[in-house]
């Protein structure tokens, strides 16, 4: 009985050691996996939804790793150059300020109507870009301009476009060439800013870093009057279509995006 008991104990000890080793490897794997997930400066995972966001209907518009759901505005695929995906960040690369000289604009494959869009953007000195929405539906490889309402992204202090337009309607967070952003608080160049666009029927809002800076009714007579005085005056149904693409602009300057998510109403 004594020899048998020792054998059993020895076997139990070996099993325990094996279990401990397996557990250690699993734990180490989880640690390595966690370290591989890109995080922001506060240690929060990038391009991830919380349970509360999922329950509220939010979905990732960009998964942080692939080009799924996006294509070139004039292509049937994602641009092969001009855009970079690295460490959970989507970046349009600079080309000396020459608009769409490399990769060109990118658009969602899906059309959107009533939605709330949320993302973060980071400018480089003197940079220009934009988030367009209600972009006219486009077939791949079709010709013509890529037009839509635009949430302006701009280095107001260095880019000359900030001085053009009317009363600042080409500055950051403005409805480009139509309505200037008011009371905005912009983070310094090189830091992340948070943009939100909310559309419910005709009612539209632009938000910057938690503050509403633009509000308008895209179906109102007042809005149509603004269009007649803008660069969009010759585009039939501009801003009036029921649904359109969402676009990230290649304006020839390096600008980065992350945490791109959307919920539809």
Image: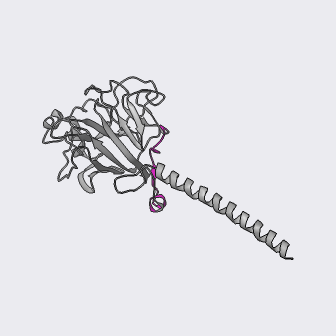
Q: Is residue 8 above or below residue 40?
A: below
> Which secondary structure dominates the residues rendered in magenta?
loop
Which residue is more in the foreground, 41 or 126? 41
Left or right: 50 as drawn, with respect to 224: right
x and y, in percent, of residue 88 in the image? 42, 44
x and y, in percent, of residue 12 in the image? 75, 68
Q: Residue at x 64, y 63 (%)?
A: 20
Which residue is more in the foreground, 86 or 132? 86
Determine the residue located farthest toward the right in the rendered image.
1
Q: Which residue is drawn at 20% across and 44% down?
A: 179
**Model colouring:** one colour
x and y, in percent, of residue 6 in the image? 79, 72
Q: How many labels does the image show?
A: 0
Which residue is more in the foreground, 145 or 153? 153
Q: What stretch is highlighted in magenta?
A: 52-67
Instruction: Give the quarter of the figure containing the N terminus.
Output: bottom right
Q: Is residue 5 above or below residue 195?
A: below
x and y, in percent, of residue 15 in the image? 73, 64
Residue 61 part of the magenta segment: yes
Determine the residue located farthest toward the bottom in the rendered image.
1
Residue 159 part of the magenta segment: no
Q: Residue at x 68, y 63 (%)?
A: 17
Instruction: Give the quarter of the figure containing the C terminus.
Output: bottom left
Which residue is more in the foreground, 42 or 221? 42
């Amino acid at each position: 009985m004594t020899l048998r008991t020792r054998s059993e104990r020895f076997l139990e000890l070996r099993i325990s050691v094996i279990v401990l080793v397996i557990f250690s490897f699993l734990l180490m794997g989880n640690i390595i996996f966690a370290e591989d997930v890109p995080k922001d400066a506060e240690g929060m995972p990038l391009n991830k939804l919380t349970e509360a966001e999922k329950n509220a209907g939010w979905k990732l518009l960009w998964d942080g790793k692939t080009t799924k759901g996006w294509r070139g505005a004039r292509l049937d695929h994602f641009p092969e150059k001009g855009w970079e995906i690295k460490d959970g960040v989507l970046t349009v690369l600079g080309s000396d300020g020459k608009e769409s000289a490399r990769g060109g604009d990118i658009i969602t494959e899906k059309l959107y109507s009533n939605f709330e869009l949320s993302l973060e953007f980071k400018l480089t000195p003197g940079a220009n870009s934009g988030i367009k929405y209600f972009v006219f539906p486009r077939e791949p490889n079709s010709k013509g301009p890529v037009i839509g309402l635009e949430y302006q992204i701009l280095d107001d202090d260095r880019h000359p476009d900030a001085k053009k337009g009317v009363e600042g309607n080409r500055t950051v967070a403005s409805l480009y060439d139509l309505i200037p952003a008011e009371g905005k608080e912009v983070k310094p160049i090189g830091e992340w800013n948070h943009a939100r666009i909310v559309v419910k029927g005709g009612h539209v809002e632009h938000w910057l870093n938690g503050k509403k800076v633009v509000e308008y009714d895209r179906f109102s007579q007042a809005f149509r009057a603004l269009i007649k005085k803008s660069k969009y005056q010759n585009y039939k149904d501009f801003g009036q279509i029921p649904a359109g693409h969402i676009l990230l602009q290649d304006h020839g300057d390096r600008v980065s995006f992350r945490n791109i998510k959307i919920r539809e109403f």
